[in-house]
Amino acid sequence: MALYAIGDVQGCDAELGTLLGILKFSADRDSLWFVGDLVNRGPDSLKVLRRIRALGDSCTFWRLPMAGRGCAAMTRSMTF
């Protein structure tokens, strides 16, 4: 089991997918901590949120106090 901390994804879903592939991340085996902004600058903020949601309990983000202001505003205003 591995624990990976990933910061400031900034809406870059393709790059997040590439990183998870390089890490050979498995939601059945590994865990992710997302810190910093998930959304905002990149072109695919909604895809990032959907990817993380699909990974389920292997991800911790929503409870971390370090979540960026952009993430909080976006997640309050949308359904995904």
Image: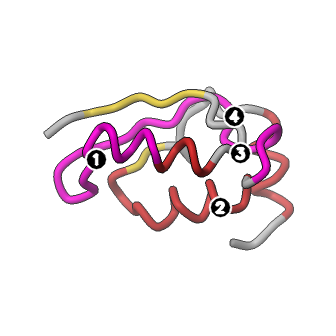
| Among the two numbered marks 1 and 3 on one chain, the one whose residue lies closer to the N terminus | 3
Local SS, label 3: loop
Local SS, label 4: loop
Q: Amino acid at mark 3?
A: Gly
Discs 4, 3 touching: Cβ within 8 Å: no
> x and y percent of residue 76 in the render?
80, 58
- Identify residue for label 4: 37
| Among the two numbered marks 2 and 1 on one chain, the one whose residue lies closer to the N terminus | 1
Discs 1, 3 touching: Cβ within 8 Å: no
Kindly identify the residue that appears in the image at 73 percent across and 54 percent down.
Answer: 44
Local SS, label 1: loop
Nearer to us: label 4 or label 3 = 3
Local SS, label 2: helix
Kindly identify the residue that appears in the image at 71 percent across and 37 percent down.
Answer: 10
- Identify residue for label 1: 25
Decide whether residue 39 is among the magenta residues.
yes
Kindly identify the residue that appears in the image at 71 percent across and 45 percent down.
Answer: 11
| Among the two numbered marks 4 and 3 on one chain, the one whose residue lies closer to the N terminus | 3
- Identify residue for label 3: 11
- Identify residue for label 2: 47
Q: Amino acid at mark 4?
A: Asp
Instruction: Kindly report the distance in space between the C-alpha atoms of the residues bearing marks 2 and 4.
Output: 14 Å
Instruction: Kindly report the distance in space between the C-alpha atoms of the residues bearing marks 1 and 3.
Output: 19 Å
Instruction: Kindly report the distance in space between the C-alpha atoms of the residues bearing marks 2 and 3.
Output: 8 Å
**Dividing the image into 4 quarters, which one contains the N terminus?**
top left
Kindly identify the residue that appears in the image at 27 percent across and 33 percent down.
Answer: 3
67 vs 26: above or below? above
Q: Amino acid at mark 2?
A: Lys
